[in-house]
Image (spheres, rainbow, N blue to C red):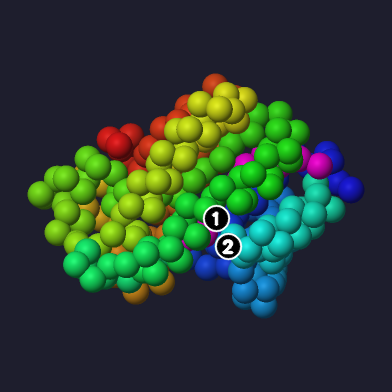
Amino acid sequence: METTHANTVLVTGANKGLGLETARRLGAEGWKVLLGSRDEARGRAAAEKLAADGVDVVPVPLDVTDDASVAAAERLVREHTGHLDVLVNNAGAPGTAVHPAQATVADLAPVFDVNVFGIVRVTHAFLPLLQAADHPRVVNVSSGGGAFSVVTDPGQAVSKMHELAYSTSKAAVNMLTVRYAQAFPEIKFNAVTPGEVSTGKFAATDMNMHRGQLTVTEGTDVFVKFALAGPDGPTGTFEDRLGPVAW
């Protein structure tokens, strides 16, 4: 077992988009990257690309909606490191924009299973490895659409998007972040959004059919910021690449 590597990070949903870019950027800093991916073949292909660029990377099959998969991922990670410096809970599901008049539990449940319960599953499983690090950090990927300050602002496009699943799940991510931060003062928990709330811009990803005005690199600026934060860094906050976002 390797226990001496200076920095280790597990990124969920890392075979493409924001997760892959986060893995690439931290790998370029010399970090050991545990690349989580629900699709094992896609995860392996993504890891091979990073390895070709010199990144120390291990593909980790990881379905955040499956307890057995999460447990197997934790065992695999333990084979490569005795501690986890950073966990990036990036895996997410957009759901479908079903109007509240038609929305049922069946529309919300799959989104919550990934966006909310997935964070709980993974964080719970990896807490011991996080606690074994010198100053562990957890980055929870949220959205401006999960902020009451944004959804209640008539000037924000999301205020006119009548759906329940995605926005409520991301609001739950924000609360999870605060509650974890309060319960574990030795671990820095922060929520991030890849968009720019004040400008209304968002990162171009598969989830939005690449309609965003920001690149994945710009979108992950705040992910990397909190991943690289020192022992005196913030905890229990919500930010985009431009700074703090009101809850």
The residue labelled by disc 2 is: 65
What percent of the width, then of the height, locates residue 193?
38, 48
- SS at mark 2? loop
Residue 145 vs residue 122: left or right? left
Q: What secondary structure characterizes most of the magenta part?
A: loop
* Residues packed near mark 1 inside 10 Å, few (<14), some (14 to 19) or many (20 plus): many
The residue that appears at 75% across and 33% down in the rendered structure is 132
Q: Residue furthest bottom?
A: 41
* Residues packed near mark 2 inside 10 Å, few (<14), some (14 to 19) or many (20 plus): many
Whether residue 86 is in magenta: the answer is yes
- The part of the image, by quadrant, that contains residue 130 is top right
What percent of the width, then of the height, locates residue 201?
25, 55
Residue 101 vs residue 216: left or right? left
The residue that appears at 48% across and 52% down in the rendered structure is 116
- The part of the image, by quadrant, that contains residue 136 is top right
Residue 114 vs 143, above or below: the answer is below
Q: CA distance from mark 1 to mark 2?
A: 5 Å
Residue 230 vs residue 7: left or right? left
The residue that appears at 68% across and 54% down in the rendered structure is 33
What segment is highlighted magenta in the picture?
82-92
What percent of the width, then of the height, locates residue 124?
64, 44
Q: Are marks 1 and 2 in contact (CB under 8 Å)?
A: yes
What percent of the width, then of the height, locates residue 139?
52, 43
Q: Amino acid at mark 2?
A: Thr
The residue labelled by disc 1 is: 118
Residue 172 vs 73, above or below: the answer is above
Q: Amino acid at mark 1?
A: Gly
